[in-house]
Image: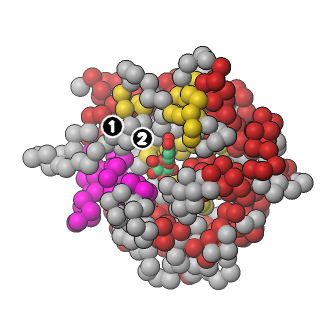
Amino acid sequence: EELLHRASAIRFPSDFVFGSATSAYQIEGAATLDGKGESIWDRFTRRPGAIVDGTNGDVACDHYHLFPRDIALMKEMGLKAYRFSLSWPRLFPQGSGRLNAAGADFYNRLIDALLEADIEPFLTLYHWDLPQALQDRGGWYNRDTAMRFADYAAGAAALFGDRVTKWTTLNEPWTFCWWGHATGEDAPGLADGVKGGVAASHHALLAHGLAVPLIRSEARNAEVGITLDVNVTEPATDREEDVEAARRFDGAQNRWYLDALFRGAYPEDMLDLYGPRLLPDIRPGDLETIAAPLDFLGINNYRRSVIRAGTELAPLSFARVAPEGSDYSALGWEIWPQAIEDILVHVHETYRPARIYITENGMATAEETPDVKGRIEDVERAAYYVGYVEKVASAVARGVPVKGYFAWTLMDNFEWALGYTAPFGLVHVDFRTQERRIKWSGEVYGRIAREAPGR
Ligand code: PNW
């Protein structure tokens, strides 16, 4: 097949790692077992209408019990790294204070099994499942949550830092701050507009900055980074109002985080746009804390953002445009492989992070069922991976220091507000039986993982 030929032609440096990514709430299940505390997603999924199919992550992929099988699948596909997150309330049911020993035991067994299988753990501390106990005290609106996160990070680094060297503080602050606090589509489900998104973002970034030096001092040889979902943003037309809307959107999603982390300052145009009425309590020294030097930047990229002037989230006042003639995933996300090369080159040239990992990239389809031969022939997803990985290779060839790539996601799982209706996996999961089977995309991606580095 043509796709397999293209997959086999991809070349990367020999130290480039291919892996897959997941997050705790989306796969673990065991939501109330062994002393785990409640998270904001446990709570939010109970809200009528919050999740399109009325489901939740109570069981999900039952990875809590089935992780040895999941590691065997990674091994079968030839993956060399695994990006996963810790459930904060599984370790600290109240958010801080008492450690739940059974939670620590679970992650110890997971990490040991990964190392045994020669798969490098890339650990993320926060992938959206805030302890509900902290939400009850204001969550990311409360500056104290940043201090609690720092305690949690130090605790986790002390527990696992003898074996884990790759540490990521937050996954996608833009997404969890804005979708959780501005639009309310994600937990904790607050629809407080721009003011909510910006306030949550500042405390999340502060949490990150406070955690960085603590992870370095508690873990051995730690490399510390953060993962952002940054998108190339293009105006839909060259009309002044669309160009301005695209600049505002880029300011909110990309520059707010990148400028703070890499330049120690929020972008002036965004400070002006938000003004005293919408800006949170930003204290002297906060930006210095946030701009703690990083070992790597994680980039999640799925699509590009084509933006025109509109009515969403005033005063950002934008609308998303779906360019004609493009292909779209089942979620209506534009498939545009060039976007991943463009964003890598742009971030490298503008901010010069020491190293970059693509920490997520992947594609949703409609729900899939095995054919008569028991196979899932997800050709579109396989083509998506080949197309995007080719563009990551071009970025490397252009001198961008990309050191690894993680497919989102290892296996079909709980896709947040979309429940189980939007599978992204390299591996199909039958949620009635917990049976797993590697899809065609998993075979193609496995070929890339095994063959592309160092040839
Ligand atoms: C990521 N967008 O979120 C998350 O990190 C994952 O947990 C999630 O399952 C995955 O992407 C797929 O949705 C995103 O609008 C949410 O482009 C939204 C976007 C991208 C990523």
Residue 381 - label: 1
Residue 94, image x, y percentages: 62, 79
Tell me which amino acid carries mark 2. Answer: Gly
Residue 362 - label: 2
Measured along the vertical axis of the image, is residue 252 above or below residue 187?
Answer: above
Q: Number of labelled discs?
A: 2
Ligand 1 closer than 8 Å to label 2 CB: yes
Residue 7, image x, y percentages: 36, 28
Q: Marks 1 and 2, Cα distance to the nearest angstrom?
A: 8 Å
Q: Residue placed at 64% from the left, 24% from the top?
A: 241
- Classify mark 1: residues with Cα within 10 Å, few (<14), some (14-19) or many (20+): many
Give the side of residue 287 with respect to residue 430, left or right: right
- Helix, strand or loop at label 1? It is helix
Image quadrant where residue 282 sits: bottom right
**Residue 414 on the magenta span:** yes
- Classify mark 2: residues with Cα within 10 Å, few (<14), some (14-19) or many (20+): many
Give the side of residue 328 with respect to residue 11, left or right: left
Residue 292, image x, y percentages: 79, 50
Examine the rendering and report whether any part of residue 299 can be seen.
Answer: no
Tell me which amino acid carries mark 1. Answer: Arg
Query: Which quarter of the rendered picture does the N terminus lie within?
Result: top left
Span highlighted in magenta in the image: 411-439
Q: Residue placed at 77% from the left, 60% from the top?
A: 210
Ligand 1 closer than 8 Å to label 1 CB: no
Measured along the vertical axis of the image, is residue 177 above or below residue 56?
Answer: above
* Labels 1 & 2 near each other (Cβ < 8 A): yes
